Every structure is written in C-alpha cells, then in structure tokens.
Image (cartoon, rainbow, N blue to C red):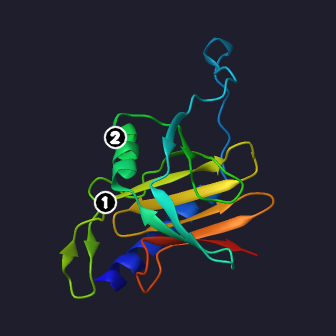
Amino acid sequence: RPDMIMRFSTLACVVAVTLASSEDSWNEDPLPVAKQATNQPPSFVQVSSPLVVLEKHPSGKARLYFDKSKYSQIKAKVEAGHKHLRLVDTGIPGEVELEVSPLQVWTDDAVIETDDGRKIRLPEMISLSGKVAGDENSFVTLHIGHEGAYGTVQSQERTFQIGTPQDRSSHSELMEIT
C-alpha cells in the first residue's frame, strides 16, 4: 500500500507540474475599461507550513514532521474559500515564504482503480501552486497529505524538492537540487 500511495502521489505531482507550467495558447479579449481589474496585489492569509523541520543534515537535506493541526488550519482556509495563502515557517533556508493558491488536481467524480480492478479512495491531500514571495519568476507546487508530501520550489537562485522517503523514516524530506 505505501508503494501504491507513492506512485499515486508522484503521478499527482507530475500532473500538477505539467498543468502549471504549460503556456496559454489563446488570446482573450481585454475586459471593458469599466470592468478591468485593478492591479492591486492579492491579499494573502498567512498560515504556518504543516511541514516542520525535525533534523537538518550537513548535506542540506532536512527531515520533515507533519503537524496535523497546521494542516487542519490550511484545509479550513481552503474550504472557506481563501484563494491566496502565504506559507511561513517553511523550513526552506533563508526563511523563504511561499505565496500559493489551492490547485484542484482531481475532478469531483475522480476514481482511482488499481491494476487488479479495485477502486480506492482518493488520498486526502491539499494541492497548492504559486511562487516564492518576492520572486515573480519562481515556481511552487506542493501536495501535502497525512501520508506524505511532494513538490518543488524553484526560484532564480535555488531549487528544492520535497518528497516522502521510501524508508518512511520521516513524513517527508526537503532537499536542495543542484
């Protein structure tokens, strides 16, 4: 079962990265002047990351703990309709904050079917995409759940990957990719 969850979560991360990085191929007519949006930045609701650093290795890898109460706070904000979240206390070196929005990876009627035809429920996960605060050219995608976390944080200077270790020695790990 952990192997199945890992395969599913990896697939979800790949799908999210693919969707979030694809370019628009159409042009939309601009809104009439009276209805054009003001260029005010969105208002972000600040929440602490549910992934908390347990231990940092000299190699730069960090083992992460899953804080259920912080996860519940984020889930409640998403379910209440908040579209812009600022994740703080991320454990990423340099006190990096992430500006993210909920990402719907699955349709409401999605079903996972195993090779032997069994249908299993979708894992409870929060999927988020966005950017590093203050870095317009950055990219963030995160999938966080009770069983593990997956994602990428890419800025102009650095790239980090979050994944669940195969040996399950921690909820997830954060490592810099060079």
Secondary structure found at label 2: helix
Vertical arrangement, residue 156 with respect to residue 72, above or below: below
Secondary structure found at label 1: loop
Task: In this rendered view, identify the residue nearer to me: 131 or 165.
Answer: 165
Vertical arrangement, residue 165 with respect to residue 129, above or below: below
Vertical arrangement, residue 125 with respect to residue 164, above or below: above
Mark 2 closeness class: few <14, some 14–19, many ≥20 residues within 10 Å: few
Residue 20 at what x, y percent from top left?
59, 56
Given the image, on which type of amino acid does mark 2 rest? Ala
Mark 1 closeness class: few <14, some 14–19, many ≥20 residues within 10 Å: few
Residue topped by disc 2: 76
Residue at 20% across, 74% down: 119
Residue 81 at what x, y percent from top left?
39, 34
Q: Earlier in the sequence, mark 2 or mark 1?
A: 2
Query: Which of the two discs, 2 and 1, sits closer to the camera?
Result: 2
Residue at 47% across, 80% down: 165
Vertical arrangement, residue 116 with respect to residue 83, above or below: below
Given the image, on which type of amino acid does mark 1 rest? Glu
Q: Is residue 34 left or right of residue 143?
A: right
Residue topped by disc 1: 124
